[in-house]
């Protein structure tokens, strides 16, 4: 008896492999079917890079920024792992959106696949929840202030808003427990829920099979059916390779992911969300007062309700897009509006000279903080204390607290000391 026979006798693995690889694909293998596999691949990559980051990350408000700066600037290839994880979130949003549109175009939400469509919509929401909870974890200026806006919107919800905000923040203000709560959501709760839904999604997909292109008879679909192995698997691998190549090239080009200066609650900062939340960010500019809250909560709720209810709104058996123009038109119109608002948001920022100046100053501060952290480390008191490691910092602090009262200003009681003091021009003057 061979080792494979011995193993099969005890595990039955051949039956599992046979069921997985030889399942017929009605109508033959198609590149249109690769999005689900690519999305699964990206999810596994996010889990892998996330585990690697967790080896070095410290979920504490005093240590989080320092640990991420260490990953980014000190750990060998840490910038690459963090970059793949950060930009992988964007890749998942893009591929999930393409997958949703392909499923909608093929009418794959119709009977008997309604539940699988609903699971897919819920998974899209979880992908966005991953992005939102992960944004805060570096505890830098961007993550801190952008997440503060998000929790503020949640807090404006009628009736339970204040309780929801307190639950998210673990108190009335942001602090150490806020970060650990977001970390727990990002690393434990959301992955557990996601894996459960992915398992159900795949099980239902296996039960119902792929949804072939409309307009072909059952006899033709069966006649042209191909096993998953090797044709469809090969196309899936091509899709995965293309997605990873683009993601890797972008990460390499950007040298990882942006890391701003340490979060400083006492500072002013122009918070901007990631691109996939830009449409909502721009939309809120068109509302004011209580209507801003209504828009921030109501519009996503309406969109989510439409997506979840689509199988029950479009109940006819016909999958031909030409006979589903109204429903596909609403879906496509929503995509166009989201895209337009996103473009407008970036164009508006590009034309704001004041914002550009403030962002340049923030970028310079971020580079200075990271350079100081790499050269001198980060004090135990927290990320913002990194500036105290700068050469002559204590001298500057001494000057500001002990010398300026007498040597600067119109009411000084001693010689004015400023740039050029003691130089030849100063003596000549």
Image: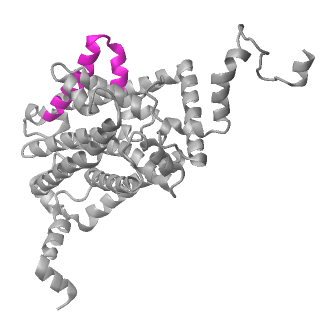
Residue range corresponding to the magenta coloring: 279-308
Closer to the camera in the image, 319 or 75:
75
Please state the horizontal and vertical placement of residue 101, each as a whole percent of the image: 25, 40
* Residue 1 position by quadrant: bottom left
Residue 294 falls inside the magenta stretch:
yes
Q: Is residue 356 above or below residue 22?
A: above
Closer to the camera in the image, 103 or 26:
103
Closer to the camera in the image, 122 or 182:
182
Q: Give the main secondary structure of the magenta stretch.
A: helix
Going 33% across and 61% down the picture, which residue do you hit?
237
Residue that lies at the very extreme toward the bottom in this rendered image: 1
Please state the horizontal and vertical placement of residue 374, each as a whole percent of the image: 57, 48
Going 54% across and 50% down the picture, which residue do you hit?
73
Could one spot residue 339 in this view of the protein? no
Could one spot residue 200 in this view of the protein? yes
Q: Is residue 423 above or below residue 107?
A: above
């Amino acid at each position: 008896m061979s080792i494979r026979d011995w193993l099969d006798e005890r595990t039955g693995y051949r039956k599992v492999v046979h069921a997985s690889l030889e399942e017929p694909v009605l109508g033959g293998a198609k590149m249109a079917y690769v999005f689900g596999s690519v999305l699964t691949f990206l999810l596994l990559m996010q889990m892998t890079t996330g585990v690697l980051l967790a080896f070095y990350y410290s979920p504490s408000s005093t240590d989080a920024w320092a640990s991420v700066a260490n990953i980014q600037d000190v750990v060998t290839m840490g910038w690459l792992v963090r970059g793949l994880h950060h930009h992988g979130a964007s890749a998942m949003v893009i591929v999930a959106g393409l997958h949703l549109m392909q499923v909608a175009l093929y009418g794959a939400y119709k009977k008997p696949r309604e539940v699988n469509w609903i699971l897919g919509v819920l998974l899209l929401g979880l992908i966005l929840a991953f992005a939102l909870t992960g944004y805060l974890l570096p505890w830098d200026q961007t993550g801190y202030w952008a997440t503060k806006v998000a929790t503020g919107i949640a807090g404006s919800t009628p009736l339970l808003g204040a309780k929801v905000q307190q639950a998210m923040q673990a108190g009335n203000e942001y602090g150490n427990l806020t970060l650990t709560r977001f970390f727990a959501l990002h690393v434990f709760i959301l992955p557990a829920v996601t894996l459960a839904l992915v398992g159900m999604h795949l099980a239902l997909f296996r039960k119902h099979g792929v949804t072939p292109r409309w307009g072909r008879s059952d006899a033709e679909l069966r006649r042209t059916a191909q096993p998953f192995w090797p044709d469809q698997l090969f196309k899936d691998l091509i899709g995965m390779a293309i997605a990873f190549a683009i993601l890797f090239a972008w990460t390499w080009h950007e040298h990882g992911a942006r890391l701003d200066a340490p979060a400083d609650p006492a500072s002013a900062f122009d918070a901007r969300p990631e691109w996939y939340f830009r449409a909502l960010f721009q939309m809120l500019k068109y509302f004011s007062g209580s209507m801003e809250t209504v828009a921030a909560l109501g519009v996503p709720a309406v969109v989510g309700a439409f997506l979840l209810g689509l199988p029950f709104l479009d109940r006819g058996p016909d999958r031909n897009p030409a006979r589903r123009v109204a429903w596909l038109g609403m879906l496509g119109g929503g995509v166009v509006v989201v895209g337009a608002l996103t473009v407008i948001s970036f164009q508006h920022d590009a034309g704001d000279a004041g914002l550009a100046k403030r962002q340049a100053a923030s970028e310079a501060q971020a580079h200075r903080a990271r350079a100081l952290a790499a050269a001198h480390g980060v004090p135990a008191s927290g990320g913002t204390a990194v500036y105290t490691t700068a050469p002559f910092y204590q001298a500057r602090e001494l000057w500001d607290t002990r010398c300026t009262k007498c040597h600067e200003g119109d009411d000084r009681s001693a010689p004015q000391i400023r740039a050029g003091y003691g130089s030849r021009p100063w003596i000549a003057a």
